[in-house]
Image: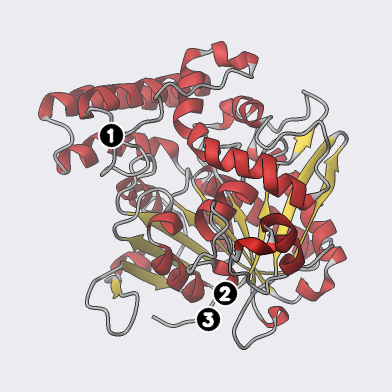
């Protein structure tokens, strides 16, 4: 592979005079199953004093399902360059080696040539990732003793929990050589019903619902709970979508990703490439929660200059071209909780971090706190008894950027003035949190 410096010169053209980092990159495909291929992209750490082999490795998993980490997470949140290909001051590459994976199969530049090969649950997602990680660590032995962390966002957190547990077991069995440092669950869809049931009270408490609106939202949310009690996951997903409609009607279109902004998701933008689009409730969920991760500017970047830079994307593959199929194939998994998996991680003494943006609605902090309180973890009462600690971006800053508390192998970060995409809204605070979680910085 060419170095990142040379490749970016090819990509941007030296005449543009864009500042470039000395950040080395590599990427590739892994056949995780027959006719199913996953794409990964690695940035070596660009630290001022340390060699990249001395720093942790972080894998970033995007949500959706079907959102591209190699695209959205990379260029919109934590990679070395933004969507204008300008250096990002708060990039995580200055602190860690950064591995993006387009996961599940069919996401981003990942693809399948068999319509039956899309994942339908997190168990398949985890199994596919084990194949990729086994090949990755086998081909890059310099990372085998490096602390490896899985960071995630939204539905990526649900997948990260399952992947983290599967990796722990593979390491224990000796089939993957890797040093698991921990799993970080950002604004994660761990217990969907706890989010849905707290939307109404949360919006009412901040004056985005009146009392009548609260009753309507709560009544709809209760129907979601009833469907789950009957094991009707498809019905629960349909009712979840209806609850979101009721919220939009009563709040004049609040944005589910940041309550201080307006939702423009349905401003004439649709994607009807999947035959499943005919299911109205799935179509609405897809438009509201996946299309924003594939905005026109990012799609143009990924299918244009980035595709040319990478040079290995098959002619038949379009970035995001199978995203809708990924989303619809996972539909039966949407409302299933994975709190039990988080409990297993804690019991196995794996470091687990939950972090959440204050202004997020789709995965509101109140809902996150609700499922955390249901953990069977033996040290939960000690954790709950702690008072949180205020965090500031710098020693001289007077403004509180976040709160956190930690007990043994569990920690929780409340990120202020951030919505669903924490690194996008509060990049400096997210970078500080990263350094704390990976044990490079104390509070």
For the point 62% across and 88% down, which residue is it? 49
- Relative side of 409 to 363, left or right: right
Name the element at disc 2: helix
Residue furthest left in the image: 211
- Relative side of 61 to 354, left or right: right
Label 3 close to label 2 by CB (< 8 Å): no
The disc label shown at residue 94, or none: 2
Is any atom of residue 441 visible in this view? yes
Name the element at disc 3: loop
For the point 51% across and 21% down, which residue is it? 270
The disc label shown at residue 440, or none: 3
Q: Distance between the residues labelled 1 and 2?
A: 35 Å
Badge 1 local density, few (<14 within 10 Å), some, or many (20+)? many
Name the element at disc 1: loop
Give whichever of discs 1 and 2 has the lower sequence position.
2
Residue 365 place in picture, x, y as percent:
33, 50
Residue 264 place in picture, x, y as percent:
36, 31
The disc label shown at residue 254, or none: 1
The disc label shown at residue 158, or none: none
Residue 22 place in picture, x, y as percent:
68, 74
Between 140 and 388, the one lying in front of the other is 140
Q: Is residue 101 above or below residue 334?
A: below
The quadrant the C terminus occupies is bottom left
Between 381 and 177, the one lying in front of the other is 177
For the point 72% across and 34% down, which residue is it? 318
Give whichever of discs 3 and 2 has the lower sequence position.
2
Q: In this view, does 123 lie above or below 380?
A: above
**Quadrant hosting residue 195:** top left
Badge 3 local density, few (<14 within 10 Å), some, or many (20+)? some
């Amino acid at each position: 592979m060419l170095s990142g410096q040379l490749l970016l010169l090819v990509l941007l053209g030296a005449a543009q005079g864009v500042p470039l980092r000395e950040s080395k990159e590599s990427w590739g495909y892994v056949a995780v199953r027959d006719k199913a291929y996953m794409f990964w992209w690695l940035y070596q750490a660009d630290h001022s004093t340390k060699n990249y082999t001395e720093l942790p490795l972080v894998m970033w998993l995007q949500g959706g399902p079907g959102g591209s980490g190699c695209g959205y997470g990379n260029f919109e949140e934590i990679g070395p360059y933004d969507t204008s290909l300008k250096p990002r001051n708060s990039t995580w590459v200055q602190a860690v080696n950064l591995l993006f994976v387009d996961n599940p199969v069919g996401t981003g530049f990942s693809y399948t040539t068999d319509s039956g090969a899309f994942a339908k649950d997190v168990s398949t997602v985890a199994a596919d990732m084990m194949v990729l990680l086994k090949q990755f660590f086998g081909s890059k032995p310099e990372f085998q003793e490096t602390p490896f962390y899985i960071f995630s966002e939204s539905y990526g957190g649900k997948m990260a929990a399952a992947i983290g547990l599967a990796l722990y077991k593979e390491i224990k069995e000796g089939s993957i050589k890797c040093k698991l440092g921990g799993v970080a669950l950002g604004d994660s869809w761990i217990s969907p019903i706890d989010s849905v049931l707290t939307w109404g009270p949360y919006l009412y408490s901040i004056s985005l619902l009146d009392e009548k609106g609260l009753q309507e939202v709560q009544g709809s949310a209760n129907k979601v709970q009833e469907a789950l009690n009957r094991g009707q996951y498809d019905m629960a997903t349909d009712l979840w979508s209806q609850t979101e409609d009721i919220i939009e009607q009563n709040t004049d279109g609040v944005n589910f990703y940041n309550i201080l902004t307006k939702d423009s998701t349905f401003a004439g933008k649709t994607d009807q490439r999947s035959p499943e689009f005919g299911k109205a409730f799935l179509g609405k969920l897809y438009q509201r929660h996946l299309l924003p991760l594939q905005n026109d500017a990012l799609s143009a970047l990924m299918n244009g200059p980035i595709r040319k830079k990478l040079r290995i994307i098959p002619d038949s593959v379009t970035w995001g071209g199978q995203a809708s199929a990924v989303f619809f194939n996972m539909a039966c998994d949407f409302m299933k909780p994975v709190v039990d998996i988080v409990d297993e991680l804690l019991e196995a003494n794996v470091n687990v971090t939950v972090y959440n943006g204050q202004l997020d609605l789709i995965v509101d902090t109140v809902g996150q706190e609700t499922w955390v309180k249901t953990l069977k973890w033996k040290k939960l009462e000690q954790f709950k008894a702690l008072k949180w600690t205020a965090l500031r971006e710098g020693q001289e800053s007077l403004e509180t950027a976040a709160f956190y508390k930690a007990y043994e192998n569990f920690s929780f970060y409340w990120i202020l003035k951030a919505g669903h995409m924490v690194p996008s809204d509060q990049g400096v605070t997210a970078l500080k949190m990263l350094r704390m979680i990976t044990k490079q910085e104390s509070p």
